[in-house]
Image (cartoon, coloured by chain):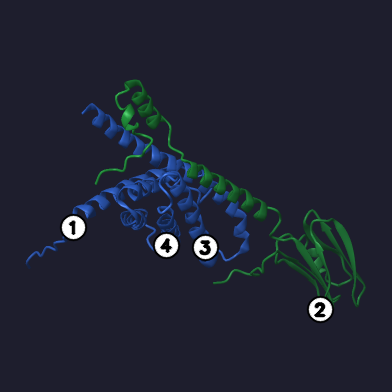
Chain colours: A blue, B green
Amino acid sequence: MTASTIKLNTSAEDHHIARMAAVALGLTILENAIPSPLPGVKPGLANIVTLIVLARYGWRAAAWVSLLRVVAGSLLFGNFLAPGFFLSLSGAVLSLLALALAQHLPKRWFGPVSHSIYAAFAHITGQMLVVYLWLIPHAGIAYLIPIFASAALVFGTVNGLIAARFMDNESTLKCRIQTKI
Amino acid sequence: MPAPLSPNSLPPAGERDAGSLREFHVYRAATLPHLKAGDWLTLLLGGLCVVLLTLKLWSGDLADKAVIRSGGKIYREVPLSRDQQIEVHGPLGISVITIEKRKARITSDPSPRQYCVRQGWLQQAGEIAICLPNEVSVELTGSRKKYDSLNY
């Protein structure tokens, strides 16, 4: 039997997306180690990577990174195609849709913090829709919406600030290098 | 592809030589995370959204009315916000319905088996107590139509 190799032609961009998705995956695993006060309330640290990729490489790359992270993450945690996976997926898809709109906000006034907050709200919207339409079709879950919305606001802001800070550090570094030259 | 430089982190061209000012800009860029005007607006909108959602969803939206039926017809619809006792006349006698602390129950009823009385307090929208012999029922409703069981 001859060994056959499948050669995939990958571009530099593919490699970059894969690297970024790996970073996001690392943050997801890190986040899973943090105990949560309430099931479902998570900081969503991996979204920091999505925000940075969005700002630097555009929406398409951000969508790849985000969706790869969801699928690979579910494989790692063993809940691929389980309810948890669909919760992540619906959240990620709605976040990406929100980001697709939010990225057209004027850059002069709106930064990653705005993107992050809109994405976070879209994220819980997606999750609550899946919960209500599929998992728990009971109006009682409406009680939980204020908790999730507050969490979205807080963590959305924090993630946005981290992303903004990170990108600032980078441009500051560049600024230093430029001024030294 | 170079990272887009944010305008705040790079001092204006005229000030590049002014070392201390540049240091200040660098320091500011490194320590102060940038919240632009629009970001504050977004934060404000988000906060408003959370407050409105909380007010809307945590103000007893889930069960806010008791529908009392007698003989199959709606006898009265009363809000749960006011504590009161209501007497309903049926074919066997008087059923007494008590509303207290946003809950409702049938306090007394002439039915032989007392099922509806023993059911106790009703709290959630969709809950219902029926006194069949006396043809009296109390149903709690919210602003939306509820499922009365889980279904797919």
Question: Are marks 2 and 4 in one subunit?
Answer: no
The nearer-to-camera label among 4 and 1 is 1
Marks 2 and 4 sit apart, C-alpha to C-alpha, by: 45 Å
Residue situated in front as seen by the camera: A66 or B85: A66
Crowding at mark 2 (Cα within 10 Å: few <14, some 14-19, many 20+): few
Badge 4: chain ID: A
Badge 1: chain ID: A
Marks 4 and 1 sit apart, C-alpha to C-alpha, by: 30 Å
Q: Amino acid type of disc 3? A: Leu
Q: Earlier in the sequence, mark 3 or mark 4?
A: 4
Question: Are marks 4 and 1 in one subunit?
Answer: yes
Badge 3: chain ID: A
Q: Which mark is residue B130?
A: none
Q: Locate residue B140: give its quadrant.
A: bottom right
Marks 1 and 3 sit apart, C-alpha to C-alpha, by: 36 Å
**Residue beneath disc 1:** A10
Disc 1 and disc 2 in contact, CB within 8 angstroms? no
Outermost residue toward the left?
A2
Q: Amino acid type of disc 2? A: Gly
Residue in the picture at 16% in, 61% down:
A8
Q: Amino acid type of disc 1? A: Thr
